[in-house]
Amino acid sequence: MIKHLSTRRMFTVAVLPLLLGLTAQVDFNEPFGRPTVVSTEVSLSATWRDLQLQLQSEQRIIAQCRADPQFCTSPVALQFLAIVNAGDQYEGLARLGHINRAVNFAIRSVRASAVQTTWTSPLDALAAGFGDCKQFALLKYAALADAGFLQNDLRLVVVRIKALKNEPHAMIAVRNQAHWSILDSRSSTIVESSQLLDYYEPEFTLDHRGVRQFIPSSSPVVALR
């Protein structure tokens, strides 16, 4: 499902934060209760930088359509705003749930093995009308940011599905009242991230800081001071 990811497993040792340099300080307050460090995955980092530029460009279009919807020339921007507005009357998990369901129903789900997809921007995904986990995750990331969720509380997470021979999968983690909740295209149910470790092996987070990788639970962690 996820292109631009290395197929080899990341080798992590106790001194991984030191090996990655002083900029790779460990962040312990992450989804799944796993610490992260700055990723060395070059291809994914480059892809994420390009997507962030596209998100910024689309934010301007969306802002113009919000300010003056009658003169909006982008139907998909109006569709995006309708997704964001789906949670307006709610708070907390209820708000997350309505936005999550709105995205899950906004585009048709396809498997990457059936229709080849690459990472695409939220408005491009809405225009196409279909996508796999990558399109759903990025659309939710943009919608939640537009809805006012803080960037420090949003993560686009790449995991591997244990039951599907470690197939890569993308979804969203949102911090709500100190707990990380998972928004997944495979379900409309919102689940606390730590409850999913039997099903998923966390690999990467993508957010405003860039790309970070999870340190496996079997590896001791040395925190930089």
Image (tube, rainbow, N blue to C red):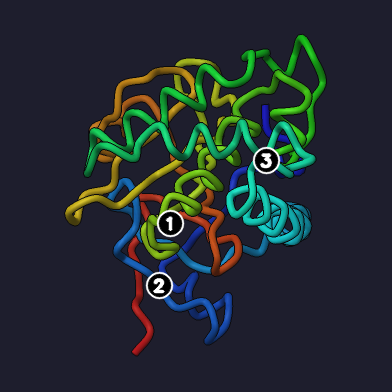
Q: CA distance from mark 1 to mark 2?
A: 9 Å
Whether 97 is drawn above or below 7: the answer is above
Mark 1 near mark 2, Cβ–Cβ under 8 Å?
A: yes
- Crowding around mark 1 (Cα neighbors within 10 Å: few <14, some 14 to 19, many 20+) is many
Q: In the image, residue 52 lies at what x, y percent?
A: 69, 59
Q: Is residue 223 above or below residue 88?
A: below
Q: CA distance from mark 2 to mark 3?
A: 47 Å
Q: Which residue is mark 3?
A: 70
Question: Of marks 2 and 3, which one's residue comes earlier in the chain?
Answer: 2
| Count of all numbered marks drawn on residues in the image | 3
Question: Helix or strand or loop: what does disc 3 sit on?
Answer: helix
Residue 121, percent across and down?
A: 72, 42
For residue 215, which numbered disc appears in the image?
A: 1
Image point (75%, 58%), residue name: 57
Residue sitting at x 42%, y 54%: 154
Q: Please provide percent x and percent y for residue 209.
A: 55, 69
Is any part of residue 134 visible from this angle?
Answer: yes
Tell me the residue that label 2 is attached to.
26
Q: Earlier in the sequence, mark 1 or mark 2?
A: 2
Q: From this viewpoint, is residue 48 visible? A: no
Q: Position of residue 223 (x, y in %)?
A: 34, 78
Relative horizontal placement of residue 146, taking residue 111 as reference (left or right): left
